[in-house]
Amino acid sequence: MKILAVDDEQDALEVLISAIQSCLPDDVIKGFNSPTEALEFAEQHAPDLAFLDIRMPGMSGLELAKRLKKVNPKVNVIFSTGFSEYATDAFSLHASGYLMKPISSKDVKKEIENLRNPVSAPKKRVYIRTFGNFELFVDGETIHFSRKPAKELLAYLVDRKGSAVTRRELCDVLLQDAAFTRKSQDYLTKIVRELQKSLEAVNAQDIVNLDRSEYSVIPENFDCDAYDYLNGKPDAFNSFYGEYMSQYPWGEKSIQQFYK
C-alpha cells in the first residue's frame, strides 16, 4: 500500500509517520511538509491512503484531499488536526477517518482497520497452493511437471520459506540418501535443471534461486496460501482443513506450525 503523510510542521510529521510505521511496517510511506510537493508526488505515484493535516499554508488539507481524489477516486483520506471544528467539512469529502492531535499508534490503527475503500494488494502471476496437495499455478493455470522429483524439489523449497537449502539436505530428504553419494548428487543436478526448465517455460524462474551449492525460493515473487495463513490473512484461514503438502511424507513434520 502506498501511503502519503502531509503536515507542515516537521515534528508533527515525524510523529505521524512513526505512528503509521508501527501499524504498517512493510508499507511505503512518503512524508511531506509541503502540500504542493505532496500533490506533485501523488500525480506520479497515486497513493492508496493519505494522512493529511488540515491547517497548512498555501493549500489546506481539505483542498489537497479534493485534488488527491481526482488522482485516485478511491484514495482513503484520514485527516489529522488539533481543531475539531473541521470534522463536518472533512466528512463531507467522504473521508475515511479523522484523528485529533496528539496522534497515537492506537488511533492510527483503529482508522486503518476501518478504511472506507478497501485496498487490495495486486495479485502476483504465480500462486502456490500447499494446503491439500502441492500445486503451482501461473496466470491461473496449473503447471504440470514432466518429472515428479522436480515438483517435489520446488515444494520442499517453498516449505523452507526462503531459507537456503544445501545439496546435502536435499539428497537426504528428497532422495533418501544421507550418505550424499556421487550418484545421488548427479541425479539431484538433473532434477534442479528440470525444475529450472519447467519454470523458464512459463516465465516464472524468478521465484527460485538455484545456486550451485544452495537453493531457495524468493517469497516476495509469488503468493502462497501457507505464507498468507502464517501472516494472519483471514482468507487463508478458510482454506486450511488440516492437510499440508499431502503427497509428500516430509510435509507431516511441518503441519504443526498451522496449529500454533
Image: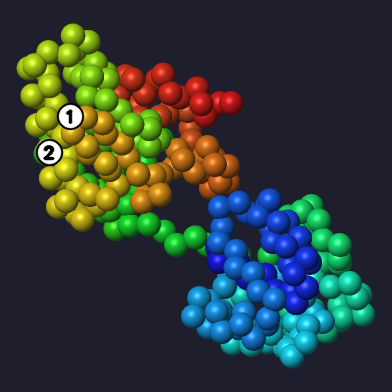
Secondary structure under the numbered disc 2 in the rendered image? helix
Circle 2: is it few (<14), some (14-19), or many (20+) Cα within 10 Å? Answer: some
Classify residue 71 by image quadrant: bottom right
Residue nearest the observer in this picture, 69 or 142: 69
Mark whose residue sits in front, 1 or 2: 2
Q: Position of residue 87 (x, y in %)?
A: 86, 77
Residue reaching furthest bottom?
Answer: 58
Please report the residue visible at 50 percent of the width from the left and 76 percent of the height from the top: 45
Label located before the other in sequence (1 or 2):
1
Question: Mark 2: which amino acid?
Answer: Glu
Residue 107: tell me if it is visible.
yes
In this rendering, the answer to whether 190 lies above or below 232 is above
Eyeballing the image, is 242 above or below 211?
above
Horizontal relation, residue 153 to residue 108: left or right? left
Left or right? Give the position of 205 relative to 129: left
- Residue at the spot x=35%, y=44% of the render? 218
User: Which residue is at a point 45% across and 24% down the rendered structure image?
Assistant: 255
Q: Secondary structure at mark 1?
A: helix
100 shown above or below 66: above
Of residues 112 and 82, the one nearer the viewer is 82
* Residue 81 x/y as whole percent: 84, 73
Query: In the rendered image, which quarter contains the N terminus?
Result: bottom right
Q: Quadrant of residue 140?
A: bottom left
For residue 3, side relative to residue 62 (left or right): left
From what the image shows, is residue 223 above or below residue 75? above
Residue 243 occupies which quadrant of the picture?
top left
Q: Which residue is mark 1?
A: 149
Residue denoted by label 2: 194
Q: Judge whether residue 76 can be spotted in this image.
A: no
